[in-house]
Amino acid sequence: MATVDGAKKLPLWKILNVSLDYCLQNVKAAAGFSLLNLLFLLLTLLLPGGYANPLFLIWLIFYYVFWCFFFRFYFNRRPYLVPRKIFDSLVPSTKILFLTAVFALGLSLLPLALPFLLPTEMIDGYTNFLREYMPELDLGLMLLLLLVSPLILYRPFMAWISSLIGRSGLLKTAFAKTEGNYWRFVAMAAIFNVVFVVFEGLDEIFDLPDAILMLVYAPLLVYVNVATAKTYEFFFLDNLED
């Protein structure tokens, strides 16, 4: 799908549908990756202290390699594990991580930094405001992250895939290829986030065990990454043209 100016427009619903079709047509592969993903997620429950445990860094490295394997398998780039390609992919992935971390950290620290900019007589009122409206502020921060996700996550992620499968990993190329699709990427991010938010809401209501949530998240993350791969195909490989 392309406009008169030549910019390709992401067919969002088609991407979601063909991603589901891929999972159903390749059910053994999808189930295998979902099972491995579930094992990775469950392993985090065994780490004393969770993410603060130094062993989490080792887990993160192997989890990164797992998703590298997934995308090389999807695009049939043999061998599926190539250390050089994994190292090459660290360049765009580091940029993605940096952009996301800087923006998220900035947003999270903003409410805490604001009192230093306020007159002394207003600090108590601002503190009470934070206590009363913190859930609404968290929602606002989540919406802001959603709005910037095309710039700091989804479009840069195209560069990561390119680098991983042996193509150009330049962010400039990824942004040029996906130009004019900002709101479509926002819509994609919103759809995926809604699913996770629904299950988090069910968790708060029914106090579900973490293992149950991970049982849901594991295949869902595989589907999300299949949709990301299909998005890459549309913009970079012309495999989903109408």
Image (spheres, rainbow, N blue to C red):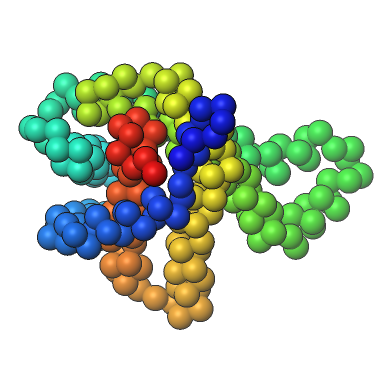
* 114 relative position to 143: left or right: right
Give the quadrant of residue 182.
Answer: top right
Q: Quadrant of the C terminus?
A: top left
Against 18, residue 106 (above or below) is: above
Residue 47 or residue 11, whichever sits in front: 11
Extreme residue toward the right, this view: 121
* Residue in the picture at 51% in, 43% down: 185
Q: Which residue is painted at 8% across and 32% down in the image?
A: 79
Question: Is any part of residue 173 visible from this angle?
Answer: yes
Q: Nearer the viewer, residue 213 or 84?
A: 84
Q: Is residue 227 left or right of residue 204?
A: left
Tell me which residue sits at (51%, 27%) in the image: 6
* Horizontal and vertical percent position of residue 141: 63, 48
Q: Quadrant of residue 119?
A: top right
Residue 152 pos. (x, y %): 50, 33
Numbered-mark total: 0
Near-viewer residue (70 or 113): 70
Pick the front one: 196 or 9? 9
Q: Is residue 54 visible?
A: no
- Residue, x 31% and y 54% (percent of image)? 19
Q: Is residue 155 above or below residue 209?
A: above
- Image position, residue 116 (x, y; %): 78, 35
Q: Quadrant of residue 219?
A: bottom left
Identity of the residue furthest to the bottom in this view: 206
Q: Image height check: is 163 above or below 46?
A: above
Residue furthest to the left in view is 79
Percent position of residue 145, x then y: 58, 44
